[in-house]
């Protein structure tokens, strides 16, 4: 099967699995909760009134269809009676047609379709940019897309999934092999510009992507593209600032919020950075709001990133930079890791990149290592299924009391994980320290033992159940030796214009698909 067909099948499977959760209740009194109703009201206003003012929709009770109880006020009421929800407008604009034609369920189903597109692109990036085997990439994309947090945010009306799709698409274009053409630059630039319009919290990820793109063009001496890109960024930045001041009255959409009494920057609170540093591990292993309780395969992120940093395959620096930007922003800038939403919200934007890093690392393991990671990933899919069963059986809802899941494994795992809502003393302090030590040891062992894992991977490649049917562009001795002599510019953003690259690296996607088909038939 060609890569395009594989990606399409993966996308359909994930979209279908995610769509099952679309009609689930978020709380006992509402189908949507927290920021979701406000995004939907703005989408309705854009569709019907062609403006961002949700004051008339609130007065008419338009939210009662998807939020059956009184909706809390988020927007400051202006002197003319208008209200603008304190959220950036791109998500409502994207959802406006689906909301106008299909209501709240139409919006959720459109987000499920976006989840499918994200899974399909994950397959393409893993195969084309990191040389992951096609079947392995498909398995990883399905396991990631059909498990928390991606499966949950695939129907929650938040900008997380669209932001993840934009970030991954920007990475795809920025790491295009060979000289970048105008359409590649335009695609990556559009992703950079669009991310803050989904939410200003994605600005750090967008900034890293922008720096990587500028570096790539500068290193390749593509002056015309570079000048055009910088001019476009300048215009886009000025437009963002001007329109936000005009519409919201400040630098960000938070300026229109009724609960930011001390200014829009109060959205980050009064940070105790030392205290917030516990989120560095908590984002993974917090008892309730970490990734690991709901997707145990997330533990593989630590060794995968460690080996990726040691081997530095093409594109690894850009991937690591985007991951670091999101992780540090979620740790030190975000008001809280916990909230009236689902776990992992602050880092969903880079979860697909993490999944790709894991796929690249898993390909270097032996058969049992791959099966172990696949089994852990399957537990995440089971966790998602358990959540849906719990909602259908009215044991709990999807958002506010998800921790009452019928899945006993989630509750059991929580006993050995730290509680980020408790003070950092006693058992919580010890558990946090233990996990910091475990991750440090795992990272060192994985990086130092990478040669042995690589040899085992090549020895068992032919018998692996997950498949290893594509050249390992980003892994293996040949690729590693080739990239050692490559400048930082090429390693930062992609395959670039390096000398001596394998012929497959220089193929266009269309030609590469044909090569896949021919090689599989033979």
Image: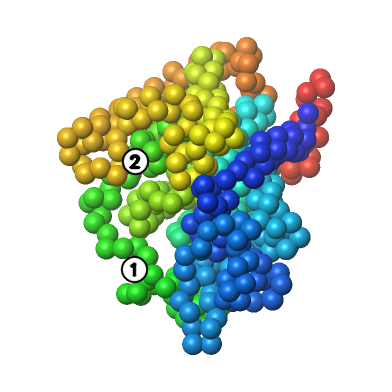
Determine whether 124 is above or below 335 in the image: above
Q: Are marks 2 and 1 in contact (CB under 8 Å)?
A: no
Q: Residue at x 53, y 83 (%)?
A: 81
User: What is the basis of the colouring in this image?
Assistant: rainbow
Give the image quarter of residue 182: bottom right
Q: Residue at x 64, y 76 (%)?
A: 51
- Cα–Cα gap, marks 2 and 1: 23 Å
Secondary structure under badge 1?
helix
Q: Nearer the viewer, residue 57 or 173?
A: 57
Q: Residue 465: which disc? A: none
Q: Residue at x 25, y 32 (%)?
A: 431
- Number of residues whose C-alpha sits closer than 10 Å to that of mark 2, classed few (under 14), some (14–19) or many (20 or more): many
x, y (%) of residue 84?
A: 53, 74
- Tell me if 444 is positioned left or right of 313 in this view: left
Q: Residue at x 66, y 67 (%)?
A: 44
Give the image quarter of residue 235: bottom right
The numbered mark, 2 or 1, whose residue comes first in the sequence reads 1
- Tell me if 206 is positioned left or right of 519 in this view: left
Q: Residue furthest left?
A: 426
x, y (%) of residue 496?
A: 60, 48
Q: Nearer the viewer, residue 275 or 33?
A: 33
Tell me the residue that label 1 is attached to: 266
Q: Count how many numbered circles sit on residues in the image.
A: 2
Of the 4 image quadrants, the one containing the N terminus is top right
- Tell me if 271 is positioned left or right of 71 in this view: left
Tell me the residue that label 2 is attached to: 282
Regarding residue 76, the answer to whether it shows in the image is: yes
Of the 4 image quadrants, the one containing the C terminus is top right
Secondary structure under badge 2?
helix
Determine whether 290 is above or below 225 in the image: above
x, y (%) of residue 148?
A: 52, 38
x, y (%) of residue 100?
A: 73, 63
């Amino acid at each position: 099967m060609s890569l395009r067909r594989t990606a399409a099948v993966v996308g359909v499977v994930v979209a279908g699995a995610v769509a099952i959760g679309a009609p689930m209740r978020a709380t006992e009194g509402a189908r949507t909760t927290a920021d979701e109703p406000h995004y939907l009201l703005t989408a309705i206003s854009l569709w019907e009134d062609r403006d961002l003012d949700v004051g008339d929709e609130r007065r008419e009770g338009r939210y009662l269809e998807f939020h059956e109880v009184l909706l809390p006020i988020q927007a400051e009421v202006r002197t003319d009676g208008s209200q603008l929800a304190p959220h950036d407008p791109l998500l409502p604009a994207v959802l406006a047609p689906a909301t106008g034609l299909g209501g709240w369920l139409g919006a959720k189903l459109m987000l499920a379709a976006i989840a499918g597109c994200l899974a399909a692109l994950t397959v393409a990036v893993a195969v084309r940019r990191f040389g992951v085997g096609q079947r392995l990439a498909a398995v990883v994309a399905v396991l990631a897309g059909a498990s928390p947090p991606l499966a949950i945010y695939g129907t929650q009306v938040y900008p997380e999934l669209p932001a993840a799709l934009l970030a991954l698409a920007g990475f795809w274009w920025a790491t295009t092999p060979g000289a970048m053409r105008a359409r590649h630059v335009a695609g990556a630039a559009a992703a950079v510009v669009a991310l803050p319009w989904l939410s200003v919290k994605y600005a750090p990820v967008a900034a890293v992507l922008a720096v990587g793109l500028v570096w790539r063009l500068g290193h390749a001496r593509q002056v015309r593209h570079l000048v055009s890109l910088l001019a476009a960024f300048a215009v886009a930045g000025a437009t963002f600032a001007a329109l936000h001041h005009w519409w919201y009255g400040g630098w960000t959409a938070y300026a229109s919020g009724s609960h930011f009494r001390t200014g829009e920057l109060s959205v980050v609170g009064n940070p105790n950075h030392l205290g917030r540093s516990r989120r560095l591990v908590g984002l993974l292993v917090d008892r309730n709001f970490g990734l690991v309780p709901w997707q145990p395969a997330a533990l593989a992120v630590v060794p995968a990133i460690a080996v990726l940093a040691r081997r530095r395959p093409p594109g690894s620096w850009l991937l690591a930079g985007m991951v670091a930007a999101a992780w540090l922003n979620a740790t030190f800038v975000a008001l809280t890791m916990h909230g009236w939403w689902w776990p992992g919200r602050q880092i969903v934007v880079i979860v697909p990149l993490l999944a790709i890093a894991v796929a690249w690392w898993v390909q270097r393991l032996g058969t049992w290592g791959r099966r172990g990671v696949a089994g852990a990933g399957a537990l995440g899919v089971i966790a998602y299924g358990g959540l849906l069963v719990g909602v259908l059986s009215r044991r709990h809802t999807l958002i506010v009391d998800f921790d009452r899941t019928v899945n006993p494994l989630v509750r059991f795992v929580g006993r050995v994980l730290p509680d980020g809502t408790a003070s950092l003393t006693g058992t919580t302090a010890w558990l946090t320290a233990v996990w910091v030590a475990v991750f440090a040891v795992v990272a060192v062992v994985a990086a130092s033992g990478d040669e042995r894992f690589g040899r085992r991977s090549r020895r068992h490649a032919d018998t692996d159940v997950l498949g290893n049917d594509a050249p390992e562009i980003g892994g293996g001795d040949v690729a590693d030796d080739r990239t050692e002599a490559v400048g930082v510019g090429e390693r930062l953003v992609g395959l670039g214009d390096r000398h001596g690259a394998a012929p497959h690296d220089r193929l266009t996607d269309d030609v590469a698909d044909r090569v896949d088909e021919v090689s599989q038939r033979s």
